[in-house]
Amino acid sequence: MTIHKYGHAHWEGDIKQGKGYISTESGALKDQPYGFNTRFEGKPGSNPEELIGAAHSACFSMALSLMLGNEGFVPESIDTKAVVSLDKVDGGFAITKVALDSKVKLPGIEKDTFDKIIKQAKEGCPVSKLLKVDITLTYELEN
């Protein structure tokens, strides 16, 4: 089974003064502005790094829920933040790492069992598999 989803970007102008708009198939984002100023200068709007972070945190949380469910556990909540680092390297820019930080509320699970499952979720998440950068994981289990 193959599932296809899409995002769309429109861009006009040069890199510094130009601007673009990002939309998603679902309409969750519709003509969201992005540009040099939203990416590097903290102006309102979106940027590729925050979109990757949102996708990675969502995917990881779903993978963790699936893997916990496969072992008979249902989390009360999973809150994950993915910090995507964009660094200047070799005369250009590159996404160099992603730091996942997850807080999970799940009564009744042993810490060793949870540690094993959450680490498997980090490796098994489809977005983690896509990214070819260093991915770190910190987490907190609330019983």
Image: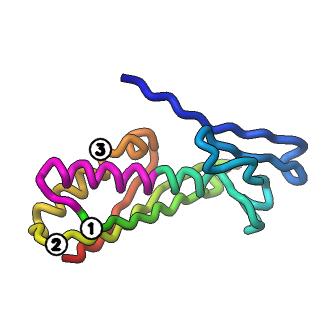
**Crowding at label 1, few (<14), some or many (≥20) Cα neighbours within 10 Å?**
few
Disc 2 on helix, strand or loop?
loop
Camera-nearest residue between 73 and 34: 73
Is-magenta flag for residue 41? no
Amino acid on which the number 2 mark rests in the picture: Pro
Along the horizontal axis of the image, is 54 left or right of 62?
right
- Name which quarter of the figure residue 72 lies in: bottom left
Is-magenta flag for residue 72? yes
User: Vertical placement of 107 versus 80: above or below?
Assistant: below
The residue labelled by disc 1 is: 76
Q: Quadrant of the C terminus?
A: bottom left
Q: Which disc, if any, is residue 25?
A: none
Along the horizontal axis of the image, is 1 left or right of 98?
left
| Mark-to-mark CA distance, 2 and 1 | 8 Å
Find the magenta span and give its range. Answer: 56-74
The residue labelled by disc 2 is: 107
Amino acid on which the number 3 mark rests in the picture: Gly
Q: Which disc, if any, is residue 124?
A: 3
Disc 3 on helix, strand or loop?
helix
Residue at far bottom of view: 142
At 25% from the left edge and 48% from the top edge, which residue is drawn? Answer: 66
